[in-house]
Amino acid sequence: MRRFYKAVGIAPAAASDVEGFHVLLDGRVLKTPAKAALLLPNAALAEAVAAEWAAQAEQIKPDSMPLMRFCATAIDRVAQDRSYTVQELVRYGGSDLLCYRAEDPAALIAREQQVWQPLLDWFSQRYDIGLNVTTGIIAVKQPEDLPARLTRILEALDDFRLVALHSATTGTGSLVIGLALLAGRVDADAAFAAGQLDELFQAEAWGEDYEAQDRRSGLLEELRQVQLFLKLL
């Protein structure tokens, strides 16, 4: 799509009973792909999204606007069906990456223990939920009330934070890592290192695969954008 606007700005929502900020393109309220008004919770996030639109050249490149993508997803998808996103995240929690440890070699076992166990300990202390850990790929049985307890935790989040958590969780394969990033327990780089621990270990041992390296670079950038998005919220 060609750039169709000149001026970019923000403005508070006009309605007296609505709180938030709009992004304006040539004075008109920016809309989501589903044609809903892009109403954002604060001026800082609105300014950041406006900066993404202002930075577009002759051709608009959606891939260069991750904050806009997060916001539009929150409004167009999550707000319309929160239960779908919540239940998908609950499923990740039921088979969390951090619960499945290597059987060998010893160096990998030690690294998983060093990096993953503190995150599980933090999760257990913060939410009073203990997750069971196993070795290998055979599914480990988790507490029967885990889905209900995770659902309550996730339903307490607003639509925008659910989007951030979904991106971090699906990217790393771990709801625990996603929640740790959401809470500021880890930053984006630490979340990436934890989620990619096994793969990075293999790369150290056997050499780098360039396609995998490109994919990991994309994931790291996505997690950094999630961290920025959470900071702006």
Image: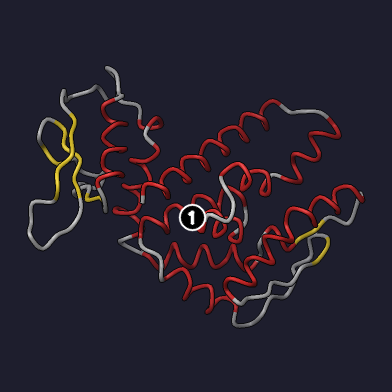
* Residue 194 location (% of width, % of height): 68, 49
* Residue 63 location (% of width, % of height): 41, 32
Front residue of 183/2: it is 183
Which picture quadrant has residue 175?
bottom right
Describe the element under mark 1 as helix, strand or loop.
Answer: helix
Q: Taking 178 as reference, is 56 above or below it?
A: above
Residue 11 placement, left or right of 40: left
Quarter of the figure with the N terminus: top left
* Residue 117 location (% of width, % of height): 74, 61
Q: Residue at x 48, y 56 (%)?
A: 165
Label 1 neighbour load within 10 Å: few <14, some 14-19, many 20+:
many
Residue 100 placement, left or right of 52: right
Q: Residue at x 29, y 18 (%)?
A: 57
Residue designated by label 1: 166
Three-letter residue code for mark 1: His
Q: Residue at x 23, y 23 (%)?
A: 3
* Residue 46 location (% of width, % of height): 26, 42
Q: Which residue is drawn at 30% across and 61% down?
A: 80
